[in-house]
Image (cartoon, helix red, strand yellow):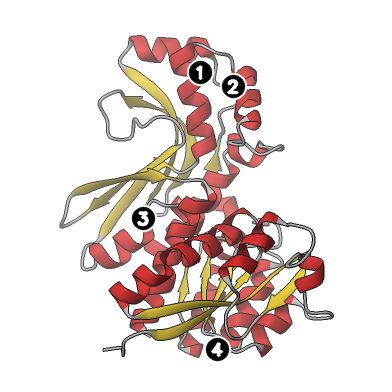
Amino acid sequence: MKRKNETVRISIIGFGYVGSGVAEVVTRKRAEIARKHGLDLKIVGVADLRGVVVDEDGLSAKTLRKLSAGERGVGSWKEAAAEGLTSLDLIKEVEHEVVVEATPTNVETGEPGLTHIISALEAGRHVVTSNKGPLALEYRRLTELAARRGRELRFEAAVGGAMPLISLVRQNLAGNGVISLRGILNGTCNYILTRMAEEGLPYEHVLKEAKELGIAETDPSKDVEGTDTAVKLVILANSVFERNATYKDVAVAGITEITTDALRLASEAGFVIKLIGEVNKEGFLRVAPRLVPKADPLNVGGTLNVAKVKTDLAGEITVIGKGAGPIEAASAVLSDIIWTAKHF
């Protein structure tokens, strides 16, 4: 049993929406986590393209808020950053236990996240990441390195955001054989299809609306063409079914060709159209718009994600949650940090 209020020092690499969200939830929940779990979480360094800020005694809540807001003046990145220090210096040289890797996903090379994760594991740090790129490209290499170093690599936020899918399979369903996973893994696509179906609005109109609301990126192609869902499927195939899959193994179709007429005809027949990702133990991986019965648990609206896990013992279990948003992703990161700290 861990002694009460054991200090867990954390660095955050990538201080955008997810990274700053992690800082916010750690600050907000620090006292509660100390009380409930006996862990004193301290963020000792943050890094992104603006620089590296370090305080080995723990960055204050005030400093973290100012860095998150990018404010000018005292506490700004320019004044707070350590001159000449890089993200790799922070990972390797500053003493801490957990690296949170939250840089943007790059599915072509995995960088810079791939190098960050490798460097952290080699330096003896545990890694919690929301970054899909390194996991989709080098899952086996990274997990084998973590095992050799006796460190933990956790990535709940990379697949389902706030939806506890990886932990459900690995922990709550331990002992079960997973037969298949099927679900909606991209909130942007689900929002677009939901609005098109409910309001009879054309695709381009809803896409523009999603961009204005911040639900879709300025360049939403990876979402609407199915790439984001496919990358998540690869991670699921490798982590749940112990495969060595890549993006090329996934049959992918997006939602760009879905029309209001198709949605209306589906509705009249008792169905909705959803972008569904599917993976099973035989190695089948597919992302495509599928007809889903209106009464099916997979019929969720808005930006929600949903996954249906079919097992040999527990039968079929469905989990629903928010798949996007900085606080939602940060909640998954925080859970991974706490789990790691309590088990290592």
Q: Earlier in the sequence, mark 2 or mark 3?
A: 3
Q: Taking 182 as reference, is 75 above or below it?
A: below
Task: Work out whether residue 9 can be spotted.
Answer: yes
Question: Are discs 4 and 1 less than 8 Å apart at CB?
Answer: no
Question: Are discs 1 and 2 less than 8 Å apart at CB?
Answer: yes
Measuring 68% from the left and 79% from the top, which residue is drawn there? Answer: 54
| Residue 133, percent from left and from top | 61, 60
Q: Quadrant of the N terminus?
A: bottom left
Q: Earlier in the sequence, mark 4 or mark 2?
A: 4
The numbered dot on residue 196 is 1
Q: Which residue is mark 2?
A: 206
Task: Work out whether residue 156 can be spotted.
Answer: no
Q: Nearer the viewer, mark 2 or mark 3?
A: 2
Q: Earlier in the sequence, mark 3 or mark 1?
A: 3
Q: Residues within 10 Å of mark 4 (few under 14, many from 20)?
A: some
Q: Which amino acid lies under the numbered mark 1 shown in the image of this protein?
A: Met
Q: Residues within 10 Å of mark 2 (few under 14, many from 20)?
A: some
Q: Earlier in the sequence, mark 3 or mark 4?
A: 4
Q: Which residue is mark 3?
A: 165
Q: Secondary structure at mark 4?
A: loop
Measuring 50% from the left and 41% from the top, which residue is drawn there? Answer: 186
Q: Which amino acid lies under the numbered mark 4 shown in the image of this protein?
A: Gly
| Residue 13, percent from left and from top | 64, 69
| Residue 233, percent from left and from top | 47, 51
Question: Are discs 2 and 3 less than 8 Å apart at CB?
Answer: no
Q: Which amino acid lies under the numbered mark 2 shown in the image of this protein?
A: Val
Measuring 28% from the left and 57% from the top, which residue is drawn there? Answer: 178
**Quarter-of-image position of residue 122:** bottom right
Q: Which residue is mark 4?
A: 124
Report whether 312 appears left or right of 114.
left
